[in-house]
Amino acid sequence: MTSVLITHPRFVEHELPGHPESPERMRAVWHSLKQAGITEQMTQMTPSPASDEAILRAHSPDYLELLQRVSRDYAQQIVMLDQDTWLAPGSLQVARLAAGACLQAVDAVLTGEADNALVVARPPGHHACPGAAMGFCLFGNVAMAALHACTVHGLDRVMVVDLDVHHGNGSQDILYSDERVGFFSIHQSPLYPGTGAALETGAGPGNCYTANIPLRAGHGDATYRALFESLLWPLARRWKPQCVLVSLGFDAHHADPLANMRLTLAGYDWMVREVLALAQDICDGRVVFALEGGYQLEVLAHGVQNLAHRLLGEERLSDPFDNSSLRTRSDSQDVIERIRRIHAI
């Protein structure tokens, strides 16, 4: 099995001192992959920056011009684009590389160069809206990759599975009216950014191609298993994607400081195995995993290491956390039944 790892040393250059979305996230993952011997087992690729053409499939010309102007006029400063998203010297080029990494992952998988791909990049992307930066994100990396799959590779059915604890409002906005891309998100609600209601199901040609599963805080492995089995699998079989793209955030783990979900690393490992099985069943295994959030460094490091082992076909799980006293909610059935009614599952 050929697995591609796409990352870049410049991903540590985008920095706002003291911010949780820090370069240390990359360093922790790189160290973990190297220590586990994974780096040598995967085919490594260095991404090229996303072109203006690729960016403009997802974002407005005014927004791209704004980023270019700020980067030029404030070249030696850190500029806040919203309350928690910034543009530092070099950030625009780093963000282009992060988006380009996702495009290259799609290229590798769809041309048969790789069976699957892992993108370890920052800044993350799923909050970036068509016309604005948001939530640590500058470009909609995974949404851009989905549109790249359709436009460049001619696919007419792609599925984005967003497993970050925060709703991927930017990905949703970019893809909301596009019938070529199904968007499936499990996220904590209420929580930033406050979007992702169950009744947000798409618009125009994209109606019924967005499925949001908002959960109250406190749900864990058992709930996610039930949601996969009752909702993700049936929708994937209905949508019949030719490729699956996963926005994977490790911030639904019980130790993450920015949210209140109760997943374990074993729970994440189970979800990865299910997505791999789903992709194998529906689209010949064509799947790309792209890193989104995750702000507890040990969780992030072990989580990505476990993911890489699975992509390589290895059954290895590293979990240094004590989950023995973990209490989780068990009231997921009402949510499942509501989503089933909304989507006629």
Image (cartoon, rainbow, N blue to C red):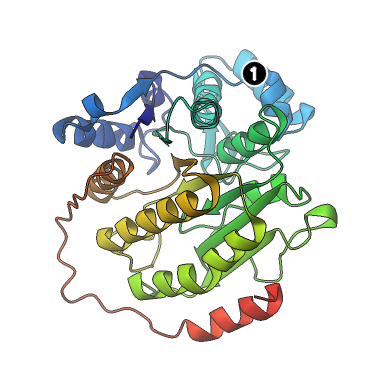
As drawn, 298 above or below 166 = above
Residue 258, compared with residue 78, is above or below; it is below
User: Considering depth in this image, is 192 or 213 the residue closer to the camera?
Assistant: 213
Residue displayed at 63% across by 53% down: 169
Residue 323 x/y as whole percent: 19, 69
Provide residue 100's location: percent of width, then percent of height: 54, 24
Rendering coords of residue 282 (x, y %) = 54, 52
Q: Quadrant of the N terminus?
A: top left
* Residue that badge 1 annotates: 51
Tell me, yes or no, if residue 237 can be seen here.
Answer: yes
> Which x, y percent locates residue 196?
63, 63
The residue lying furthest to the right in this view is 204
Frontmost residue, 258 versus 341:
341
Determine which quarter of the picture holds residue 206: bottom right
Work out whether residue 297 or residue 203 is closer to the camera in this orientation and state it: 203
Question: Can residue 256 be seen from the camera position used here?
Answer: no
Q: Residue at x 32, y 78 (%)?
A: 328
Name which residue type carries label 1.
Ser
Instruction: Estimate how packed mark 1 is, as few (under 14), some (14 to 19) or many (20 or more) residues with alpha carbons within 10 Å.
Output: few
**Position of the C terminus by quadrant:** bottom right
Q: Is residue 196 left or right of residue 108?
A: right
Q: In the shown orientation, is residue 327 left or right of residue 121?
A: left
Q: Quadrant of residue 151?
A: top right
